[in-house]
Image: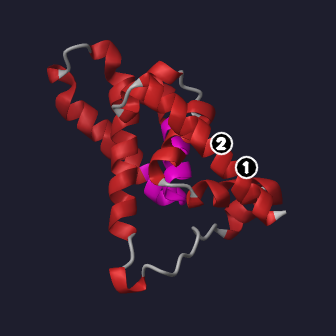
Amino acid sequence: MYARHALGLTRLALIMVGDRETAEDVVQEAFLGLHRRFAHLRDQDRAVIYLRSAVLNQARSVLRRRRLPSWFAGAYDPPVWSAEAAVLLSVERREVMEALHRLPRRQREALVLRYYAELSEEETAQVMCVSRGTVKSTTSRALDALGRLLGETR
């Protein structure tokens, strides 16, 4: 299972947290959690859904820990890309990633799950623990906001 899903989950975590080392840690924690709970899963075929949810929740925890003190909350610095990542990513892709990180957390998660992880609306709803309709409306608002943000950079 690890060999089949680790890369995709790491990519998902990378988009959410912004750096490879933390993304790898997030995925390792998710697999460790699955290992601990595997015998207790009601439907073991849903292990991949569990892993996606665990990666998303772990990424949220990382981002919460990174928050600045409230007295400094007015300043925002987008994630700093390593020199290696900067070379690999085109200017347009970096602009999209920076705009994506400026979206509210829930909108960013919906877009990443739907279009990057290529999950269906139903699968996205399961991972986010929301209804399918919420996924549709959140995704629509996120696409509109992303378009506006990208329009600002051009």
The residues bearing labels 1 and 2 have C-alpha atoms spaced at a distance of 6 Å
Tag 1's secondary structure?
helix
Crowding at label 1, few (<14), some or many (≥20) Cα neighbours within 10 Å? few
Crowding at label 2, few (<14), some or many (≥20) Cα neighbours within 10 Å? some
Magenta range is 7-24
122 and 131: which is toward the camera? 131
Give the side of residue 5 with respect to residue 66, left or right: right
81 and 1: which is toward the camera? 81
Percent from the top left, x then y, of residue 26?
38, 49
Which image quadrant for residue 53?
A: top left
Q: Residue at x 46, y 25 (%)?
A: 133
Tell me whether circle 1 and circle 2 mark residues in contact (CB < 8 Å).
yes
Residue ID for mark 2: 143
On screen, 66 above or below 27?
A: below
Q: Amino acid at mark 1?
A: Gly
Residue ID for mark 1: 147
Which image quadrant for residue 71?
A: bottom left
Percent from the top left, x then y, of residue 103?
56, 55
